[in-house]
Each structure stands twice: as C-alpha cells, then as structure tokens.
Image: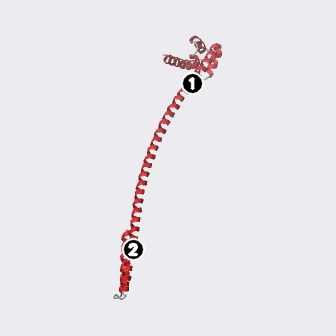
Amino acid sequence: MISRVLRLLIVLLITVSLVGLSYASPKSDQNLSVIVEKINELRSLESLLNKKIDQLNKEKKEIEQEKKQLENEKRQIDEYVKKKKKEADEYYASIKKQADQYILQKQKELENLEKQIASVKIQKLSKIYAAAKPQAAAQALSEMDEDVAAQILVFMQARKAGAIISKMQPKKAAEIFQKYLLKKSQMKINTQ
C-alpha cells in the first residue's frame, strides 16, 4: 500500500516536471540539461523512496515476526497458568479431603473419649450408689433421668440393683427397670 502510493507520487512529480518544462523553449540546450537534471533528481528521489520502502517492509516483517512470537509466548504462558491452576485445584482438593478425613477421625476419637469419660463417671456413680442404703439410692435415682439411672444400675451387681429398684415407686421402678434391661442386653452384645 505504501509503495504503491509512493510510486504514484513519483510518477506525478515526473509528470509535473515534464509538463512544466514543456512550456519552456524546447530548442534550448539549457532546457534539455534542466530536464536531465530533474530526471536524475527524480531517479535519486525514487531510489531513496525505494530504500525507505524496503526498510519499512523489513521493519514490518520484523514486527509481524515479533507479534507472532509474542502471541506464541502468550499462548504458552496461558497454557502454563491453566496447567498450574489445575494442579493447584487438585492439590487443594486432595488436602481438603485429607483434612476432612482427619477431622472426621478426630471427631470419632473425641466421641469415643467422651463415651469413655461418661462411662467412667457412671461407673463411679454406680459404686457410690451401690455403697449407699437401698432406700437413699432409690430416692436419688428416681429423681434423675431414667436413662442415666438405668445406666448406673447396669454397672452394679444384679442383687444390689434389684434391692434399689424394689425401694422405688412402682411406676418409676417399671420405667427404669425396662431401660435397665435394654442397656444390660446392649452391653452384652457390645462385649461379644
């Protein structure tokens, strides 16, 4: 595009110069030398313009090559970033899964410890109530939660538990005894 415009400009300059010289007297040698001089100037100008066009075309090719290289590098960087993001996401998912499993394991361990602590406390209470008089133990157990009372009785000898239950109000005794039997059977199943 640039070279086409420059060539048209050169042709136009030559034409204008020649038209200008055609009004001078054609018989004069001086006019002929002026025409030759003008033509030489125009050729020199055309040569300079052609060099400039070649230089601009060379620079254009270099710029296009650099552009292609930059686009290629950008594509490679984009692929690298995408790959690293995927790796990071996979690593995060793996770490999260491990953390979730660890937390779940620790929660189960905590629940087991809480059960063991509760069981130890119940066993200590069981010893305390077993050592008490049946009437006093019956009154205290009747006032607490039926499940806890039944659990305390489970850790006593059957004869001692029976003596305490016999001193309770019949309705309360029946409810606690029913839970006592259930917990006693669960305890046997768990130990097998």
Nearer the observer: mark 1 or 2; the answer is: 2
Q: Is residue 57 depicted above or below 128 in this figure?
A: below
Q: In the figure, residue 151 lies in which quadrant? A: top right
Amino acid residing under circle 2: Ser
Residue 150 spot, x, y in % from top left: 57, 19
Q: Position of residue 14 (x, y in %)?
A: 36, 78
- The residue beneath circle 2 is 44
Name the spot of residue 40 as percent of width and height, x first.
Answer: 38, 77
Residue drawn at 57 percent across, 16 percent down: 155
Crowding near the residue tagged with mark 1, few <14, some 14–19, many ≥20 C-alpha atoms within 10 Å: few
Distance (Cα) linking label 1 and label 2: 101 Å
Residue 30 position in % (x across, y down): 38, 85
Q: Which residue is mark 1?
A: 113
Identify the mark nearer the N-term, 1 or 2. Answer: 2
Q: Residue sitting at 39 percent across and 68 percent down?
A: 51
Give me the residue at 64% from left, 19% from top: 140
Q: Which of the pair 174/92 is nearer the observer?
A: 92
User: Badge 2, how many Cα within 10 Å: few under 14, some, many 20+?
Assistant: few
Q: Is residue 156 left or right of residue 98?
A: right
